[in-house]
Amino acid sequence: MNESEQIARARAGDDAAFTRLVETYQTVIFNLCYRMLGDPAEAEDAAQETFLRAYSQLPRYDPGRSFKTWLLSIASHHCIDRLRKRRLTWLSLDESLEPHPALHEQSPGPEETSVKREQTAVIATLLARLAPDDRSMVVMRYWYDLSYEEIADATGATVSAVKSRLHRARAQLATMLNSKPQAQRQPARTAVTLGG
């Protein structure tokens, strides 16, 4: 059964079909929540809440829209709400996130592993200093490779607003990176090159 059929069955009340959709997207949603919130337990709660909200909103889901983008939108908005409520620093300097899967190599040496860990910690710290809405867009664009149109659809912003916010967020990240002492800046320079 393809995804469209699973969605149609889930919308018709088939709980098993919805469970298969959850199984398909649970890792993607957890990862987004983790990147946004920085705490595995809180990310797990947020992911569960995302699927509960998606289940309750299934009758309003537009089948012409990407289901993945719709779920990411729900997760992103929920995480932004959580961040606004707690108003705390997202990650401390000594915490780190696992690197994006694209950064993994077959068998990195100890030095390379150490550099990547430092890069990840620097990126996590810098992301934590962005406004929640900007952080959400950066994560969707650079961790999930969503197009500007998909991000606009997920956030309810216009494409030009998404481009503008991403540009501003990249500029903020660059400024924050350049304000670090030279010794701290070197390992992260390549990791924070977020492109156009």
Image: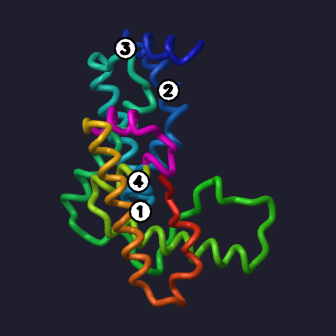
Q: First in sequence: mark 4 or mark 3?
A: 3
- Closer to the N terminus: mark 1 or mark 2? 2
| Element under disc 2 | helix
State which region is magenta.
140-155
Label 4: which residue? 138
Question: Could you say which disc has been placed on residue 21 in the image?
Answer: 2
Tell me if mark 4 has few (under 14), some (14-19) or many (20+) residues whose alpha carbon lies within 10 angstroms of its own.
Answer: many
Residue under the image location 53 percent in, 43 percent down: 27
**Callout 3 environment at 10 Å: few (<14), some (14 to 19), or many (20+)?**
some
Quadrant in which the N terminus is drawn: top right
**Residue contact at pointers 1 and 2, CB within 8 angstroms:** no
Give me the C-alpha separation between circle 1 and circle 2: 24 Å
Label 2 to label 4: alpha-carbon separation: 25 Å
Give how far apart the Cα atoms at labels 2 and 3 are: 12 Å
Q: Amino acid at mark 1?
A: Asp
Amino acid on which disc 4 is placed: Val
Q: Which residue is mark 1?
A: 39
Q: Amino acid at mark 3?
A: Arg
Q: Nearer the viewer, residue 153 or 113?
A: 153
Judging depth in this view, the residue of 178 and 184 nearest the camera is 178
Cα distance in 3D space between marks 1 and 4: 18 Å
2 or 4: tag closer to the N-terminus? 2
- Which one is earlier in the sequence, the residue at label 2 or at label 3? 3
- Residue beneath disc 3: 11
Local secondary structure at mark 1: loop
**Spot occupied by residue 20 in the image (x, y as percentages of width and height):** 53, 25
Q: Amino acid at mark 2?
A: Leu
State whether residue 187 is above or below residue 108. below
